[in-house]
Amino acid sequence: MVDLAVVTNAETFERMRAPLGERGVSVQHVQVDERTLPLSPADAPFAPGDFDVGFVYPSRLMEGDVADALLDVPWMNGRDAILTSRNKAGVLARLGQAGIPVPESVMVSNPVDESELADAFEHFDAPVVLKPNSTTRGVGVAKVGDLDSFLGVTDYLDLVHDYRATGDRSFLVQEYVPDARDYRVMVLDGEYVGAVERRLPEPDREAGRWKHNVHRGATATPVDLDAEYRRLAESVADALDITFLGVDLLVDEDGGRVLVNETNARPTIDDADKYEPGFYDRLADVIRTTAESG
């Protein structure tokens, strides 16, 4: 039996526990945040040797470093994978250099002059999308259609970034792809393992809502993804060198453009019917291989 440490006790933990247990992987929750953590070896709640492998590195990097030291395990997705995927601008730059299609984007590293912001806005046909560089679940993403509104939103970002403890002061200005289909594609160890289409309910779309994040009310429906899109997602995981990756694709209304919008190296595991047959067999194999590498 391989002992797997999972640092998030949410849907992913509950969904993976039974099927992996049937495949010789004991899934256990290791809480590393929102608690007190004694650091001395005599008092620490977990220690090297308690686990064989970690699932994905914690999202909070300070707590993650402590967990890494106390657990001393190889991670299926380690710290570097989390940092790479979290930096949206870095991902887009890497993928662009690899010839992978991504939305036209400009990174803004605050503070910058208003004239530079205006130039960034005018680089695109309105509306544009404003997106914090390192948030998830669609937090802080806005669509603006004119320069005054654009500058107003960046004023609010200035106020947030002025707080000295704010680490990342960058954000993205991106082209808006109207009426795009939104897919989350899962890649495991370089191979496609499933996909969903994320779509808002029709009344929300008619009301002008456009974010397709599940946490914003969209539904995720399994799809038989086109082979071209599968290969594209696999090429993204290969370019970023990330073992378990969610790849977000935007497909424009007539299907003429397919763009890699974002990636997620801490993806939620969905219900089993959203994956290809054998998903958990492959996941168990990757976990065992990672454990053996340590």
Image: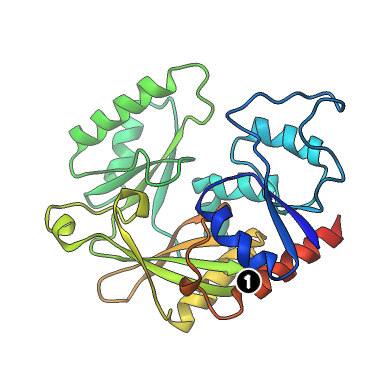
Tell which of 24 and 53 is nearer to you: 24
* Residue found 21% across the figure and 61% down from its top: 201
Coordinates of residue 107 in the picture (x, y in percent): 44, 42
19 in relation to 208, above or below: below
Residue 92 horizontal side relative to residue 118, left or right: right
Q: Estimate the x, y position of residue 64 in percent, counting from the top left.
A: 68, 37
Above-or-below relation of 130 to 163: below
Query: Do we see residue 114 in this rendering?
Result: no
| Residue for badge 1 | 280
Residue 116 picture quarter: top left
Examine the rendering and report whether any part of residue 63 can be seen. yes
The colour scheme used here is: rainbow
Question: Which residue is more in the foreground, 178 or 43?
Answer: 43
- Residue drawn 50% across and 76% down? 230
Q: Residues within 10 Å of mark 1 (few under 14, many from 20)?
A: some
Q: Residue 118, located in which quarter of the rendered image?
A: top left
For the N terminus, give its image quadrant: bottom right
State which quarter of the image contains the C terminus.
bottom right
- In the image shown, does 1 or 71 lie closer to the viewer? 1
SS at badge 1 = helix
Relative vertical location of residue 168 with respect to residue 79 in this rendering, above or below: above
Q: Position of residue 158 (x, y in %)?
A: 37, 23
- Residue 194: horizontal and vertical position, in percent? 50, 73
- Tell how many labels: 1
Q: Residue at the spot x=77%, y=53% of the render?
A: 53
Which of the two residues, 69 or 241, is positioned nearer the viewer here? Answer: 69
Q: Amino acid at mark 1?
A: Tyr
- Residue at screen point 32% across, 76% down: 256
